[in-house]
């Protein structure tokens, strides 16, 4: 945002005007939102959003170049308005950061004002639109005519404009679908949570195998009366294993033997088993008031009853560990052929213009889940947003360099 | 190295910072104490750095998951900013604020002990984990130092003792902090795309990170517009509160109930 004049006091009128305009824009947004009965902004999808953005950008270039010295344009692209809008957006974000989003329904006043959908509502959209005009004009002024000394400004501000504009304009074209698929089955239909309906996909997913690796189990005391879990004091050894010791008021538990993967034999005694089917078993010594007793505990599975020990009104329980890795071995089939792939969290796979993510599973069944939830995402505007991100980072690196150089003379 | 050793290490670090500070004041009378005073102060930070390294090895994951773990890094890094500022710009007073802040965060950790937990949920198992969190931590450390410098300037300003150099210090710390905040925000967006399918979902933590970023973006524009130094010191001093909400406070807000950014053990 370029400067219109020097000093806080000289700018005070411009600041006052900018603050009033920002306030008006935010209030108008809330008024429209209220009158529309809390319904969000009507969305423009491709190609209309592309055309809108192109016309908007062209208008900004025209305004910035042809009417550069008009007082209104100078004000529209100036720092005072930019600052007021930054605070306006921060205020709206603050509302969105405090009030739970998406939770409210009905005709209550907060819902009619769109306070539960701040970031897709009229006040946010109008404020950002004016902010994009302000930011865009400042970028035009720093770009035409081009000077190498303005490169950092152009990259940072231009990148921010592109990322913000492409992110908002492209939001209606973003598709996020959930594909539920069971082991040994194939699915080519997906669920859209926002619209609560199923759609046909241009490809199908066959789930060959779903597996979960878990961290070590936890030894806890369960109080069924209050439905509360009481972890013991375990000293320096943190993982349940041979030698693990945990203390609760009045008694202590020591693990004498630990089997990471085991199954009971015909007499109920645990025997080592393969990692796919076996469950953790621990033989523990429970000592209290000079007496001790040895018992086997296990975490349980659909075919094995959990091994717990009752201690008065409590139960000594071995909980399964939290998931370390969960992955789906899938075969993807589409117009371009078949592709076997492994999906894990943080390791998405691209297929036919879609990006597939390991999203979840049947959490009640835990590691025995036969169901895998896969998310399919298509975002045609992503390259533009990423272009903005990389411009911001380049401008940011230059800003850092300039700051360090100038900072040498503090 | 486990959390059982933490109270001893934390206490020793604080003792080093306190003893070093006392020696530094004493060195005004006895110049021979000057170098030992710095060695003792730096020893406190080295001790904490060594604990973090050993704890990392014991945990078999970077200790960057829980709030307590981030406070630990913070406590180790913020005095480093104080020492570097003195080394580079010959401004000595900032390190005392930095060591006090570090001690404050260690005391919080001592009063709310973490649970030794090796678990690193799948969403955090990413090449982005360390760069994203470390860049943010250094950004927060610089902005905390900037806020401390601004408070110092406000108090000395009340006694009409602030010089131009002190204003510049808070400004450049804020500028560098903002740069790191920006990198952290963009790294986070790129990571979110890989982990959760979209780069921005207005999750409460993301929203507050955005608000913090806007607060400092506002500062830089006020500064570019030649707003008075006195007002800017107040702005910087208070902006850090927004960062604190983003760091800790967001977990207590009603909006946080559905946040995907909660990594505390249940």
Image (tube, coloured by chain):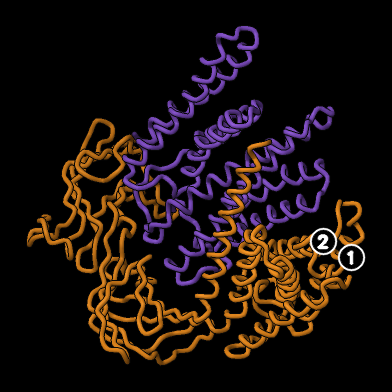
Chain colours: A orange, B purple
Q: Are marks 2 and 1 on the same chain?
A: yes
Q: Residue A274's spot in the image, x, y percent?
A: 13, 62
Disc assigned to residue A17: 1
Q: Is residue B234 visible?
A: yes
Judge from the rendering whether residue B207 lies leftward or rightward of residue B66; answer left or right.
right
Q: Residue at x 29, y 54 (%)?
A: A215
Q: Residue A340's spot in the image, x, y percent?
A: 24, 79
Q: Residue at x 45, y 52 (%)?
A: B131
Establish if A125 lies above or below A151: below
Establish if B162 lies above or below A59: above
CB atoms of marks 2 and 1 within 8 Å:
yes
Q: Which chain is mark 1 on?
A: A
SS assignment at label 2:
helix
Residue linked to disc 2: A80
Q: Residues within 10 Å of mark 2 (few under 14, many from 20)?
A: many
Give the total of numbered labels. 2
Would you identify the image quadrant in which residue B59 lies?
A: top left
User: The N terminus of chain B appears in which quarter of the rendering?
Assistant: top left
- Mark 1 or mark 2, which is nearer the start of the sequence? 1
Depth check: give the residue in front, A391 or A80.
Answer: A391
């Amino acid at each position: 945002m370029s400067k219109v004049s020097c000093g806080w006091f000289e700018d005070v009128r411009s600041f006052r005007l900018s603050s009033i305009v920002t306030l008006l824009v935010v209030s108008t947004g809330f008024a429209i939102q209220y009158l529309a009965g809390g319904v969000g902004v009507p969305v423009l999808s491709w190609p209309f959003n592309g055309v809108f953005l192109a016309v908007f950008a062209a208008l900004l270039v025209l305004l910035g170049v042809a009417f550069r010295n008009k007082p209104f344009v100078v004000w529209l692209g100036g720092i005072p308005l930019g600052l007021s809008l930054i605070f306006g957006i921060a205020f709206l974000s603050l509302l969105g950061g405090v009030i739970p989003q998406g939770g409210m329904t009905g005709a209550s006043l907060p819902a009619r004002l769109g306070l539960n959908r701040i970031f897709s509502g009229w006040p946010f959209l109008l404020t950002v639109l004016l902010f994009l005009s302000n930011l865009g004009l400042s970028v035009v002024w720093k770009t035409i005519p081009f000077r190498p000394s303005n490169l950092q400004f152009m990259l940072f501000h231009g990148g921010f404009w592109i990322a913000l504009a492409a992110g908002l304009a492209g939001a209606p074209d973003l598709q996020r679908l959930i594909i539920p698929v069971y082991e040994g089955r194939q699915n080519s239909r997906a669920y859209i949570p926002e619209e609560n309906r199923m759609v046909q996909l241009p490809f199908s997913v066959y789930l060959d195998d779903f597996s979960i690796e878990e961290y070590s189990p936890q030894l806890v005391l369960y109080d069924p009366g209050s439905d509360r879990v009481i972890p013991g004091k375990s000293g320096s050894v943190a993982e349940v294993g041979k030698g693990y010791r945990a203390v609760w008021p009045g008694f202590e538990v020591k693990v004498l033997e630990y089997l990471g993967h085991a199954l009971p034999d015909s007499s109920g005694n645990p025997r080592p088993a393969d990692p796919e089917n076996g469950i953790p078993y621990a033989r523990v010594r429970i000592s209290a008031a000079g007496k001790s007793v040895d018992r086997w505990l296990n975490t349980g599975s659909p075919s094995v009853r959990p091994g717990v020990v009752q201690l008065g009104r409590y139960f000594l329980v071995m909980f399964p560990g939290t998931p370390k890795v969960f992955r789906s071995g899938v075969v993807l089939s589409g117009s371009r052929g078949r592709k076997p792939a492994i999906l894990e969290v943080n390791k998405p796979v691209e297929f036919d213009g879609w990006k597939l993510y390991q999203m979840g599973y049947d959490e009640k069944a835990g590691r025995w889940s036969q169901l895998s939830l896969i998310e399919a995402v298509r975002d045609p505007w992503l390259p533009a947003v990423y272009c903005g991100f990389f411009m911001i980072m380049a401008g940011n690196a230059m800003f850092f360099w300039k700051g360090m150089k100038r900072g040498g003379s503090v | 190295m486990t959390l059982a050793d933490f109270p001893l290490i934390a206490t020793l670090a604080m003792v080093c910072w306190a003893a070093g500070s006392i020696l530094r004041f004493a060195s005004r009378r006895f110049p021979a104490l000057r170098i030992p005073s710095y060695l003792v102060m730096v020893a406190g930070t080295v001790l904490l750095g060594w604990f973090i390294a050993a704890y990392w090895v014991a945990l078999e994951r970077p200790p960057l998951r829980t709030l307590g773990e981030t406070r630990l890094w913070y406590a180790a890094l913020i005095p480093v900013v104080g020492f570097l500022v003195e080394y580079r710009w010959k401004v000595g007073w900032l390190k005392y604020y930095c060591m006090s802040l570090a001690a404050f965060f260690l005391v919080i950790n001592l009063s709310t002990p973490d649970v030794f937990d090796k678990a690193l949920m799948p969403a955090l198992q990413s090449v982005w984990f360390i760069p994203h969190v470390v860049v943010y931590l250094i950004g927060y450390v610089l902005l905390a130092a900037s806020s401390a410098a601004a408070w110092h300037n406000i108090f000395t300003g009340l006694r009409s003792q602030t010089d131009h150099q002190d204003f510049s210090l808070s400004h450049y710390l804020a500028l560098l902090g903002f740069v790191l905040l920006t990198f952290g925000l963009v790294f986070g967006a790129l990571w979110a795309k890989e982990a959760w399918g979209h780069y921005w979902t207005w999750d409460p933590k993301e929203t507050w990170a955005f608000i913090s970023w806007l607060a400092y973006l506002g500062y830089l524009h006020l500064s570019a517009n030649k707003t008075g130094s006195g007002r800017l010191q107040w702005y910087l001093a208070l902006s850090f509160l927004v960062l604190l909400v983003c760091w800790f406070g967001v977990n207590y807000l009603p909006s946080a109930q559905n946040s995907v950014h909660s990594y505390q053990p249940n």
